[in-house]
Image (cartoon, helix red, strand yellow):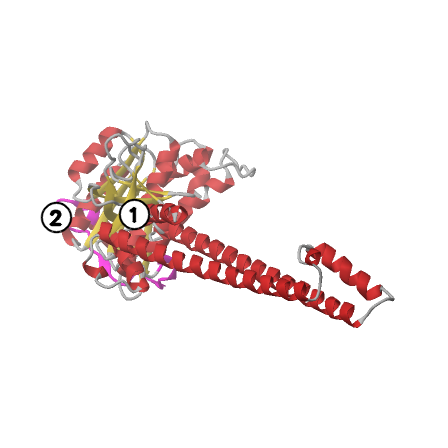
Amino acid sequence: MAETSTRARRDSGDLSALLLPELKKIAANLGIEGASDMKKPDLVQAISDLQAANREAARLEREARRAARMQRRNRNSDNDGDGDEDSTDSDNDEVAQSDDSTERNSSEGSSSDNGRDNRGYDRDRDFRRDRHRDRGDRGDRGRDRHRDRGDRGERGRDREIVISEDDVLLPVGGLLDILENYAFIRTGGYLPGPNDVYVSLHQVRRYGLRKGDVVTGQVRQPREGERREKFNALVRVDTVNGMDPETARDRVDFSKLVPLYPQERLRLETEPNILTTRVIDLISPIGKGQRGLIVSPPKAGKTMVLQSIANAITTNNPECHLMVVLVDERPEEVTDMQRSVKGEVIASTFDRPADDHTSVAELAIERAKRLVELGHDVVVLLDSITRLGRAYNIAAPASGRILSGGVDSAALYPPKKFFGAARNIEDGGSLTILATALVETGSKMDEVIFE
């Protein structure tokens, strides 16, 4: 009984770690009446009592089988004592076997000796059969224990962070950035910050999350006296891109969407005195899903052209989601762009490391892809693709193949992939990318990147 109570307390501790819906499901499977109306402590107690009763019944059944075997063994011993001496009853298995072999091989056998041999052989056979049955029972119990441990292990892997009734949950939201073996919700923009939220890969696979998704959920506030982690962990996912998480799992991947030639035009002309956008409409019209390069030497006014295009798009095409990505730019240019453009400005200034430049650009283009998957028209203005190529040349791991100008061959593919993401999607959605490129800088590296 002490072992039963100890095991019940241990199981009660395991059950207390489960959530209330899980406890109700277990209680329903066990056939506990009124489980849907019980509170968590009552459910834990009811399940523990039922499990303890089942274990007690199993123990009593094992003891009954053991008593029956002992009684049958004693009965066989008594039968042997009727036709034999008392010393024969106390012989062990090895002595009995040796006696049997001696009597069988002896030449002075009689009818009483033959009967004794047969009875000894039957007793030994019954004992071996009982012993094998005991081993089989122990093997079954061992397999059941291993199966129970495996079930608990599966529940432990599937179960997320335990939330008790007195825990305080705080709402969070931001962009999902998936790295190699973990993920984070960037709560402060596109760059890493101290308030980012950790997301496990199990949650990423469970909800079908993708890099660039806007995820809202909840984190558990640390309890009093509890060691605080560097990043709070996400304990619940509420929405993914404004949708239910189960609905978001059925999205079509961006790479599986059907690309088409641009079919709808982006008209840029706004006012008669703004000539830049009027000339673009006349000479090089832009369509939804198009990719284009603005090529010029430094200090020729590429940034001003981008500002004019951005303002024209927000004025004439308000249905388009505008994203201005500034890589390796001056902080004052970033401020000017944020104040003059009515759109999303994503920047990584030149005082930041090259890794930040590449991560910001990758997260921005992934965010644009997620919007296109939802059927939105997205316009990305990148300034500049040359500086992005320089950043990849510094941050990307060396491939061992160096081109002229000191450009690593592995650093040319990511900007090309960024630029090639633009496309018009069949049955809704488009991604338009306009980027600036530097020429005539006197740098062989810039020429290689442009080419």
Task: State the CA–CA distance, disc 2 to disc 1.
Answer: 72 Å
Q: In the image, what residue occupies the spot 44% across and 34% down?
A: 395
User: Which of the pair 24/282 is nearer the observer?
Assistant: 24
Q: Residue at x 31, y 31 (%)?
A: 227
**Nearest the eye: 293 or 242:** 242
Q: Is residue 353 visible?
A: yes
- To which residue does mark 2 refer? 272
Q: Is residue 196 left or right of residue 142?
A: left
Which numbered mark, 2 or 1, is in the foreground of this view? Answer: 1
Q: Residues within 10 Å of mark 1 (few under 14, many from 20)?
A: some
- Above or below, 202 against 137 in this view is above
Instruction: Say which amino acid is labelled 2.
Output: Pro
Q: Which mark is residue 216?
A: none
Q: What residue is drawn where x is 57% and y is 65%?
A: 72
Which residue has dot 1 on it? 16
Q: Main secondary structure of the magenta part?
A: loop
- Placement of the C terminus among the 4 image quadrants: top left
Q: Is residue 92 magenta?
A: no
- 142 or 273: which is nearer to us? 142
Magenta region: 253-277
Image spot of residue 247 (x, y percent): 27, 61
Residue at 71%, 66% (x, y): give it.
121
The answer to which of marks 2 and 1 sits earlier in the sequence is 1
The residue closer to the viewer here, 405 or 192, is: 192
Residue 50 image point, x, y percent: 32, 58
Q: Amino acid at mark 1?
A: Ser
Left or right of 106 in this view: 413 = left
Mark 1 lies on a secondary structure that is helix
Q: Position of residue 208 (x, y in %)?
A: 34, 55
In the rendered image, is residue 208 in sight? no
Which residue is outermost to the bottom? 111
